[in-house]
Amino acid sequence: MRFAIVGAGFSGAVVARELASVGHTSTVFETRDHVAGNCHTKRHETGVMVHTYGPHIFHTQHEDVWKYINRFGEMMPYRHTVKAISNGTMYSLPVNLTTINQFFGTDFSPEEAEAFIASKSDTTITSPVSFEDQGLRFVGRELYEAFFAGYTQKQWGVDPKDLPASILARLPLRFTADDSYFSHPHQAIPKNGYTEIVEAILKHEAITVRLGTRFSRADATEFDHVIWTGPIDAYFDYEFGRLGYRTLDFVPETLDGDYQGYPVVNYCDADVPYTRITEHKHFAPWESHERTVVYHEFSRLCGENDTPYYPIRRVKEKEQLLNYVQRARDATGVTFMGRLGTYRYLDMDVTIHEALATAAGMLECIANNKSLPSFFTDPLG
């Protein structure tokens, strides 16, 4: 079969490679001048490997995904740590034993800290619905307001009361000194960046990549099937309005020496306009650089010509998404997948995991002479 794949990020690249491995041809359409989507990396003039669209840390518990990505590039062990500045003082995140003792001026043991936070938590909130509910139930008012309320307001542009509890529920709370941001067994960053890995995935004689090329539904007549990893609302020409996304602006700075000593420092206070500062050379601790590249990161509502990052998924967007999903299910000749195609926040490993599952599902349908469905992963789930 001949496939048109829209988007050259991990979703599109992995599906293209899996289809190519059994003889199907794919043309990958990418509007940007590079592959790898928002995971794109490139060497700065200082020699620092820069994460162009913000930091991406690879972490996974999926053994198949770990083996897959190691086929296409060398992954270097990397343990991600994050610092947070609240009211002029730097702390460790996620909230752990060190954070608790520093913030409250205590010297608790793990058991004492756990009992103390339990006494601070709002136990009247039995089923957290909003982000604020989850925060107050999670760590109590003092820690919630210090580390989560202002930062979240800046990041999402809405009152935390209007955000789902699930956003905060993903973060751990530890009563040890472990300051690792992630707990998955495999944590790494590609030695030569993500772009090289995606290029390697796409390097196959059955795959053609067209950079700087926009795909339209009129182009679909040249192919047997379309795999759409772009925004689901864009495919239908925003028939039900634009889904809500946050976008990011980066203000880069090149300096001598070391700027902050950490890869990421969050700025939690609402009166600080940026959400965080990233220092890119610290994402590659196996390298040594005399100069440094720093990004001040600002979050705002995504406009028509902006790069979408995070789906907001408030009530309005969920209603719109339901309309688009029904529209997609009624469509023929197209399958939607990935972060934009299913309007979900996805980590890289989940993106790859779902792409592998989608490719396997497609091949099974083809083998059994069945039509390809619009979704292999339910965007409403």
Image: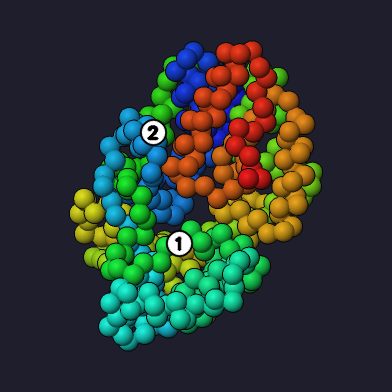
Looking at the picture, tell me which residue is in the foreground, 361 or 225: 361
Image point (56%, 59%), residue name: 166
Q: Secondary structure at mark 2?
A: helix
Q: Is residue 268 visible?
A: no
Gap in angstroms between the C-alphas marked 1 and 2: 24 Å
On-image quarter of the N terminus: top right
Q: Nearer the viewer, residue 166 or 20?
A: 166
Which of disc 2 and disc 1 is earlier in sequence? Answer: 2
Up-down: is 203 above or below 165? above
Which mark is on residue 302?
A: none
Q: How many marks?
A: 2
Q: Is residue 333 above or below residue 378?
A: above
Residue 124 spot, x, y in % from top left: 59, 77
Q: Which residue is mark 2?
A: 64
Label 2 Cα crowd, 10 Å radius (few <14 / some 14-19 / many 20+) = few
Residue reaching furthest bottom? 105
Give residue 96's position: percent from left, percent from top.
Answer: 35, 70
Q: What residue do we see at 59% from left, 51% from top?
A: 308
In the image, what residue occupies the spot 31% across and 85% down?
A: 106
Amino acid carrying mark 1 in the image: Leu
Q: Residue 74: tell me if it is visible.
A: yes
Q: What kind of residue is marked 2?
A: Asp
SS under mark 1 = loop
* Residue 171, numbered label: 1
Residue 163 position by quadrant: bottom right
